Image (tube, rainbow, N blue to C red):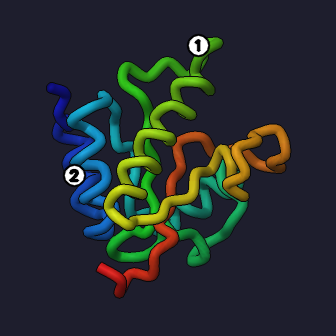
Amino acid sequence: MPEFGPRSKAQRDTLHPLLQKVVDEAIKVYDFKILQGTRGEDEQERLYRERKTMVRWPNSKHNTVPSLAVDVAPYPIDWDSPHATKKFAQLAGILIGIGWTMGIRLRWGGDWDGDGIMRDQRFHDLPHLELLNAPDEE
């Protein structure tokens, strides 16, 4: 059974408990890395300048403690694979489905409006999932 490595575990610890529940179940059925949870101001602004995010500090769900967002990637990570988008979509579907069974709603950065159509998005952030439940709904 897959398990998180040290870097993923450290990032997991920065996540809101609801996100922790989802990733803890998902790792049992699909191997993936947690790239980032909580993100500080310098990192958020750097990613904004690099156009890897559309929001500035402190407006990202990554900018909270604990983080209301997580960036994940299928393992092994192959960003240049012609199948990368499909693998990210598969991982997102697993996480969203597991969350759904727990009553935890997530939104994926590959389908911001949740309509199942990726082509209608202005900005794709395939590693990104964010918590839609209010944090006090644990």
Residue under label 1, please give it. 81
Single out the residue that lies furthest toward the front. 101
Give me the residue at 42% from left, 57% from top: 100
Residue shown at 26% from the left, 69% from the top: 17
Residue 58 in the image, given as x and y percentages of width and height? 57, 77
From the viewer's perspective, is 117 left or right of 53? right
Q: Is residue 50 visible?
A: no
Q: Secondary structure at mark 2?
A: helix
Secondary element type, mark 1: loop
Q: Quadrant of the C terminus?
A: bottom left
What residue is drawn where x is 35% and y is 87%? 136
Query: Which image quadrant: the N terminus?
Result: top left
Q: Amino acid at mark 1?
A: Ser
Tell me the distance, in whole angstroms, between the alpha carbons under discs 1 and 2.
Answer: 27 Å
Identify which residue is drawn at 36% across, 49% down: 98
Coordinates of residue 23 in the picture (x, y in percent) = 30, 49
Is 54 situated left or right of 131 in this image? Answer: right
Compared with 63, 21 (above or below) is: above
Q: Nearer the viewer, residue 53 or 33?
A: 33
Packing grade of label 2 (10 A; few <14, some 14-19, many >=20) is some
Q: Which residue is mark 2?
A: 10
- Label located before the other in sequence (1 or 2): 2
Quick check: can you spot residue 61? yes
Total number of numbered discs in the rendering: 2
Q: Is residue 65 above or below residue 11?
A: below
Residue type, numbered disc 2: Ala
Q: Is residue 78 above or below residue 39?
A: above
**Direction from residue 80 to residue 17 in the image, left or right:** left
- Residue 135, percent from left and from top: 38, 81
> Which of the two marks, 1 or 2, is nearer to us in this view?
1
